[in-house]
Image: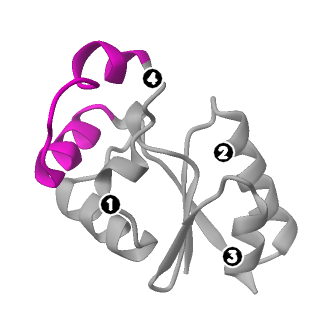
Amino acid sequence: MITIYHNARCKKSREGLEVLKQSGQEFETREYLKEPVSEEELSTLLDQLGMAPIELVRREEKIWKENYKSKDLSDKELIRIMTENPKLIQRPIVVRNNEAVVGRPAEKIEKLLH
């Protein structure tokens, strides 16, 4: 099964959703701002992405700049912060089997599907 972690207000996320629709493959949409991810789920996603937590943080978000930018945070703390503030998670994330990509640019999603 393919899952997209989606934020409908994000242009890049909408582009990623369109790639999935065009592919003709079945997928499910997880609107993670409405249905937040757990720390365990985010840890699994990071493993599938092959990324460190800091790489998944949207560092241009106001919430990051005002509250966390200058702090020395552990991976565990970063995961907690992202689950408490899901706007900080890069998007869209598309998962297929045990592989995942951040769909920026959308071509990364196309590669995952083939």
Cα–Cα span, label 2 and label 1: 21 Å
Cα–Cα span, label 2 and label 4: 16 Å
Q: Residues within 10 Å of mark 3 (few under 14, many from 20)?
A: few
Task: Tell me the SS state at disc 1.
Answer: loop
Residue 41's x, y, as percent?
27, 63
Image quarter hosting the C terminus: bottom right
* Tag nearer the camera, 2 or 4: 4
The magenta stretch is 62-85
Task: Tell me the SS state at disc 4.
Answer: loop
Cα–Cα span, label 4 and label 1: 18 Å
The picture quadrant where one finds residue 22 is bottom right
Q: Residues within 10 Å of mark 4 (few under 14, many from 20)?
A: few
Q: Which residue is mark 2?
A: 13
**Tag 2–tag 4 contact (CB < 8 Å):** no
The picture quadrant where one finds residue 3 is bottom right
**Image mark for residue 61:** 4
Question: Magenta stretch containing residue 68, yes or no?
Answer: yes
Q: Amino acid at mark 3?
A: Glu
